[in-house]
Amino acid sequence: MSTFSFIARMPDDPGALHKAAEIIKSHGGNIHRVDYDRRIDPHIVFWQVDADEDAPERITKDLQAIGYLQTSLATLRYLKFSVYLPDEPGMLFEFLGYTTGAGANIAFLDFDDRGKHPGRLTVALTLDNDTVAYRLLEELKLRWRLEILEYDSTGKKLDDTVFYIRFAQELREIIGTEDEEFLFRLLHDSNHIAQELTSQGRDPHMVFRSILQTGRTLRQTTGLGFYSLYQEVPLSTGGTLYCFQLPCGGSVYVLRNAGRIAMFDTGFGIYHREIVEMLAHFGLDPRDLEGIYITHADADHSGGGALFEAPSTMHPGSMDIIHAANRAYGSQMEGSILGQVYTKFINLFSQFNPPVNVRLLPPASEKKRNGLPVIEEIDICGLRFEVLESLGGHLHGHVFYLCPEAGLLFTGDCLINFDSLTPEMEEFASLAKNLMTTVNVDSERARRERKALLEIGADLDAQAKARDGRLLVCCGHGAVSTIEKDGLRVFGEIKRYDVADHYAVK
């Protein structure tokens, strides 16, 4: 026995589901998953079946013979027109015979029964291709008077009667010309999301809109749409810390000290070219990086690692998440489909290229700092850093990099200065929450992590103040900040870098 999945596109008629199940049963198939929700799409049904090795071919052949199998995700045509039918018995029946024969799906029908032309029927159809549309129109013109109101071959006018097909077409606009098999797998994943969200009483349509908006925003902020907020902070050691707040996702930090440079987190892979150009603007050559230090495995923090020559240091748990392609791996949320599918989509949209030249951190020692295990002490750009292991609140394998000498604490996403984010950055950050409800895999542990980091930071900040310095908190998102009684406060001046300014015609 083998398990196979397929998508059926069936008429919204009584008995249609039973007819499909009968075909599956006739070939010895055992249905162990079927999902249909007319509130999302009144025609699409997702099936998963156990059957003998040769049964899938026979099942799909029989379903295709009666027009029940979704075999293509080609762009559907949307045709809207008015047809003038005589006020005679059977006219609508005859008209529908033509549309059915053409394989058209009706989006709506509306008689002008209160207007000047009670026999005028306004019709909206979806059809597979231009040839079918033209043939249908020619047949109708020979029989009745027609007025073409609208014809769209881009899929922009499709409504929710073909929700999943429209979703696939909008995905294709974002990710390019992916093959049908790949898109079918994404639709199956999307349907799993819809099931879980519906069971939680949430609106899947809103979440699917967030998925698409995530991809579109990333695409729109590359190239000439790329910008970054930045800080250039002098250190007491004579070095300089650069913080780059990218348009989407986490902050990227570059440390220059004693003639050496290192990077903390990489940003999304889709921004790699723009990041390299931006670093060159500040006199930073990525080829000179002695190392990249990853705080955690989310795509906006590790997704460009393979695009740099420098080796990356990370926790083994981060590598496990990358291999599992599931940001919930190693947590209590590991079984949730929401984390799995979010990871798949964000990795796809952001051109995920995680580190391949990797140094894995060793197991944590018995030493702890305020309850956080100390993994090891390492030299970065001539400075001594402690690597602290998180409690797994935001993500399994999350680590923090602490340098008391220079007054630096890299916290990843366990501390974020939300006040320093632009409205556009805040909006993008909210898209992940729309799907997963929370970006932390364990909210209680995340709370304890934040508390521990703030206490560590406050103690070290008090010591730094005694030397006329400050502890600088390098947040996962947002600006370099200091710890104050009322929360995190931006340190120094934030400026803006726009890639378009460097391509402007003088």
Image (spheres, rainbow, N blue to C red):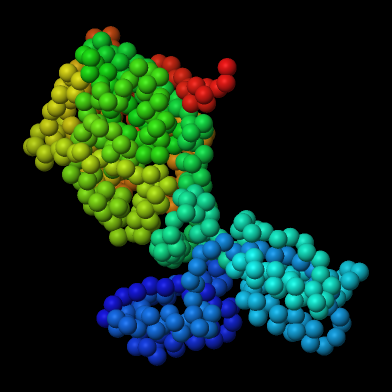
| Residue 470 versus residue 185 in the image, above or below | above
- Residue 478 appears in which quarter of the rendering? top left
x 37%, y 23%: residue:
279
**x, y percent for residue 95:** 75, 80
Name the image quarter holding the C terminus.
Answer: top right
In the image shown, does 232 or 153 lie closer to the viewer?
A: 153
In x, y percent, where is residue 141?
79, 73
* In front of the other: 8 or 153: 153
The percent position of residue 349, horizontal first and vertical second, equals 42, 47
Q: On the image, which quarter does residue 185 sit in?
A: bottom left
Viewer-proximal residue, 125 or 13? Answer: 125
Farthest residue in the left direction? 366
Name the residue at the right extreme. 116
Residue drawn at (45%, 72%) of the image: 7
Query: For this rendering, which residue is in front, 241 or 472?
Result: 241
Q: Which residue is drawn at 47% across and 36% down?
A: 222
- Residue drawn at x 37%, y 48% is 347
The answer to whether residue 207 is above or below residue 88 is above
Q: In this view, does 214 lie to the left or right of 403?
A: right
